[in-house]
Image (cartoon, grey):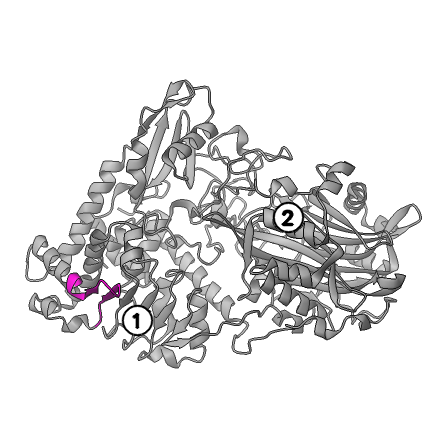
């Protein structure tokens, strides 16, 4: 590896699992609840849901507290068993055993924000003397700078904003601005170190690529010329195919040594980075990159492409030597917007699950090897075929092999009693249509007696990746019908909506959101026949559906992943069509989908599952014709059920490597990850590279975690 | 419904066997996908749950009338603190209540852990 591994590329592996957050500004909700996300205010830490440590933060300080409680004031790098917070079931109590945690796809450090430059700490002082508090001060600065600070913290009298390097100028210009009868002092003490270390690292990369002891300037010129020759401005294509045959590169001896060959590409990417300076510029000017026919076996030499051009739409790797998906792992969760991919001419394409895996890895992909992909519209019905599993089990007070407490209640997959497929048909149609055409859903499934209400659970725990993000519940709060807080009749009746018009209106008021129908793992369905009072006053068959899942909320340009619980009572109308009687929605902070994953090694069942229900006196569901549920269960026989689970394991393995590497090297997690990414997740190679880079002085001081002993 | 939920969980947390009057022979409980029908099986299941001390903390509660015959759907989310664990499990539970005399009984009860 070369020193590219030690470039803190942009929020790349972002500090502490920072993710995007939605807009909004209310910190105290209308139920009088404290916002868990107030960034700096100590008193406002409230029920802080266990924030304060990042996705990759090290945890396990002995005797550290539960994953709750005020964390806003916790100093950076301070206590808290952060590493485990994604899954308190395995939370270590009094152990020092950092373990990888689940992170949702696409929220991995190094994912979305790679192009904004490293994060710089901006210190804000002088607000204590003002009449405003820390929160007001941050909001004030957000308004002034027209920025959203993804992460902030407070240390004594100083508020610290963590700002991408690319935006630093827009902040520092507000130094000395007047705020609530005081003047704010804005400084970025580390800025010079960061910029100079970037410059020197960048030059180091380029000079390492320079063969024949040419100087860096010559190398830059050569590479710039190569880029210029290979960039097609009309087509917005950067054609880096067959680099080995490039006359200019050959002429300059780039391929004479294998060591320089591998450095050429990172250097080329450095030049590209300089040429297209902003993310927007890159997006606008380069839509496609071809790496065809470069004899690539894996991505080691070209990993940086995903850093330089994260928003690429088209990519060709045609005619390389890529054998398996593992070779593409360092691009896992990258290229989220990739629409076309060409892999033909690689051994990889002969793998049985080739197409499915490509679709899974690149969520926006519509064309693979020049063939359009037909993604299954809905495949959430798969679980319907599964029976109920063995019973709950587990011993209270038990610990696992790592000494961590085992949660007494084991969780189970799905329970579906839906002999006619009516419920699953409804659910498939409902969720597939809801995202695109709410009116269609309303007219098909809602009638004048249908009721809808929703409530917000603002204190639900969150996955690691959202620990440090504000949750921005304010658009939801005005209709949240949490009767625990308020059950006056006025409140109750004002927040339940009856009939398609009222329901449609309120659906238009709340933020829009999209469900992911492509991954059944994200969903849990409990479906159970019940009897309801039907048309004409007779009891007829209805169905109760308890759905648990997630959606991505969009609010302006902000996105926020949420978990939800949604219960439907279905009943037939006078014509026998399926209608929603009740629709009760609970929206929570994103807690992942671990809890309804099957736990295959569940010990001896406490109680065998009951046979099919026999005793309930109810009318046969004759009133609910299958035709009313046109979609039915759409299954994709090509998608093996265990696939996502396998991928998850790989990701977990990588995270485990990250922890191990960070522990050995003393690097912060984001640097450890970057280093490993660039060495193909090989611990030994990563270590060698680290030792070399460290000896060469290419690792900045702030790459090291002050809480970990350094190896040298 | 707030009162119902409070009563239900207080009873659950103090003495699970005393939940029996809230169920009927046609009641169905689905507890983490396992079905239990009838008063005895339900109470048996509840009392066999592998913990001694338990405390439910309701976070949200919403309820809607279900149909003209007075049925009510109650949707609760909350925390389940087991044996004073520092790490509560989170649950989502839906009750289908049917009026009977002055009160309600639980016809359907679907319990689900949603975060652990």
Q: Chain of mark 2?
A: A
Label 2: how many Cα within 10 Å (few below 14, some 14–19, many 20+): some
Q: Chain of mark 1?
A: A
Of residues A504 and A155, the one nearer the viewer is A504
Residue found at x 88% / y 57%: B24
Whether residue A489 sits left or right of residue A250 in the image: it is: right
Say which quadrant the N terminus of chain A sits in.
bottom left
Secondary structure of the residue carrying numbered label 1: strand
Q: How many marks?
A: 2
Q: Which residue is mark 2?
A: A506
Is residue A613 shown to the viewer in this render? yes
Front label number (1 vs 2): 2
Residue found at x 44% / y 61%: A651
Query: Quarter of the image holding residue A263?
Result: bottom left
Is residue A604 shown to the viewer in this render? no
Of residues A250 and A539, the one nearer the viewer is A539
Position in image of residue A71 (x %, y %): 51, 36
The magenta-colored residue range is: A227-241
Position in image of residue B101 (x %, y %): 93, 48
Q: Which residue is mark 1?
A: A316
Position in image of residue A231 (x %, y %): 20, 64
Q: Earlier in the sequence, mark 1 or mark 2?
A: 1
A13 in the magenta segment: no
Residue found at x 82% / y 55%: B67
Whether residue A198 sits left or right of residue A638 in the image: it is: left
Residue found at x 24% / y 75%: A293
Whether residue A223 sits left or right of residue A396 in the image: it is: left
Of residues B24 and A237, the one nearer the viewer is A237
A237 in the magenta segment: yes
């Amino acid at each position: 590896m070369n020193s590219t591994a030690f470039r803190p590329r942009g929020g790349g592996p972002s500090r502490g699992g920072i993710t995007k957050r939605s807009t909004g500004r209310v910190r105290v909700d209308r139920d009088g609840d404290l916002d868990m996300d107030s960034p700096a205010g100590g008193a406002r830490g409230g029920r802080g849901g266990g924030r304060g440590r990042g996705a990759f933060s090290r945890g396990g300080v002995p005797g550290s507290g539960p994953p709750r409680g005020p964390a806003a004031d916790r100093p950076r790098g301070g206590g808290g068993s952060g590493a485990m917070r994604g899954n308190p079931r395995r939370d270590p109590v009094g152990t020092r055993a950092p373990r990888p945690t689940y992170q949702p796809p696409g929220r991995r450090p190094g994912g979305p924000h790679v192009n904004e430059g490293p994060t710089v700490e901006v210190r804000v002082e002088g607000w204590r003397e003002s009449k405003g508090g820390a929160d007001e001060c941050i909001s004030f600065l957000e308004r002034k700078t027209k920025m959203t600070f993804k992460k902030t913290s407070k240390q004594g009298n100083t508020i610290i904003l963590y700002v991408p390097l690319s935006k630093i100028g827009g902040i520092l210009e507000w130094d000395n601005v007047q705020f609530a009868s005081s003047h704010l002092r804005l400084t970025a003490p580390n800025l010079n170190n960061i910029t100079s270390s970037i410059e020197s690292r960048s030059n180091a990369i380029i000079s390492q690529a320079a063969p024949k002891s040419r100087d860096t300037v010559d190398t830059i010129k050569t590479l710039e010329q190569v880029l210029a020759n290979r960039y097609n401005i009309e087509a917005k294509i950067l054609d880096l195919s067959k680099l080995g045959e490039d006359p200019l590169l050959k002429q300059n001896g780039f391929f004479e040594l294998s060591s320089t060959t591998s450095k050429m590409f990172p250097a080329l990417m450095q030049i590209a980075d300089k040429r297209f300076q902003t993310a927007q510029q890159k997006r606008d000017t380069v839509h496609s990159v071809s790496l065809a026919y470069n004899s690539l076996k894996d991505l080691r030499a070209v990993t940086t492409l995903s850093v330089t051009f994260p928003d690429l739409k088209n990519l060709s790797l045609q005619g390389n030597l890529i054998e398996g998906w593992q070779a593409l792992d360092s691009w896992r969760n990258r290229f989220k917007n990739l629409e076309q991919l060409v892999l033909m001419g690689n051994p990889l394409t002969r793998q049985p699950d080739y197409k499915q895996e490509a679709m899974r890895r690149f969520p926006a992909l519509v064309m693979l090897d020049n063939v359009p992909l037909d993604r299954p519209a809905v495949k959430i019905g798969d679980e319907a075929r599964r029976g109920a599993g063995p019973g709950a089990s587990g011993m209270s007070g038990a610990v696992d092999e790592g000494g961590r407490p085992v949660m007494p209640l084991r969780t189970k997959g799905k329970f579906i009693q839906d002999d006619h497929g009516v419920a699953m048909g409804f659910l498939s149609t409902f969720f597939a249509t809801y995202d695109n055409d709410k009116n269609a859903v309303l007219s098909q499934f809602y009638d004048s007696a249908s009721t809808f209400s929703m409530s917000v659970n603002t204190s639900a725990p969150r996955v690691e990746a959202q620990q440090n993000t504000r949750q921005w519940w304010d658009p939801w709060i005005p209709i949240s019908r949490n009767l625990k807080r308020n059950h006056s009749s006025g409140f109750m009746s004002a927040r339940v909506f009856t009939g398609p018009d009222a329901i449609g209106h309120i659906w238009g008021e709340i933020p829009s959101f999209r469900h992911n129908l492509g991954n059944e793992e994200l969903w849990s369905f409990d479906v159970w026949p019940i009897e309801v009072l039907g048309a004409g006053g007779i009891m007829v068959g209805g169905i109760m559906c308890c759905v648990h899942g997630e959606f991505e909320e969009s609010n302006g340009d902000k996105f926020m992943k949420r978990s939800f619980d949604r219960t439907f009572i279905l009943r037939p109308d006078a014509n026998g069509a399926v209608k929603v009687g009740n629709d009760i929605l609970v929206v929570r902070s994103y807690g992942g989908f671990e809890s309804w994953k099957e736990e295959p090694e569940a010990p001896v069942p406490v109680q065998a599952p009951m046979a099919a229900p026999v005793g309930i006196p109810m009318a046969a569901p004759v009133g609910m014709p299958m035709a009313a549920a046109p979609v039915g269960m759409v299954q994709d026989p090509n998608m093996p059920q265990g696939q996502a689970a396998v991928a998850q394991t790989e990701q977990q393995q990588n995270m485990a490597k990250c922890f191990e590497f960070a522990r050995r090297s003393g690097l912060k997690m984001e640097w450890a990850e970057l280093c490993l990414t660039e060495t193909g997740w090989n611990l030994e190679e990563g270590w060698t590279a680290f030792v070399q880079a460290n000896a060469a002085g290419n690792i900045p001081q702030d790459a090291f975690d002050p809480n970990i002993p350094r190896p040298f | 419904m707030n009162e119902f939920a409070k009563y239900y969980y207080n009873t659950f947390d103090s003495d699970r066997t005393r939940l029996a009057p809230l169920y009927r022979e046609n009641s169905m409980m689905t507890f983490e996908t396992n079905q239990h029908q009838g008063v005895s099986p339900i109470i048996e299941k509840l009392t066999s749950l592998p913990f001694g001390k338990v405390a439910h903390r309701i976070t949200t509660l919403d309820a809607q009338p279900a149909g003209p015959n007075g049925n009510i759907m109650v949707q609760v989310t909350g925390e389940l603190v087991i044996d004073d664990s520092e790490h509560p499990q989170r649950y989502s539970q839906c009750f289908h209540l049917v009026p009977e005399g002055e009160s309600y009984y639980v016809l359907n009860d679907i319990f689900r852990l949603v975060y652990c």
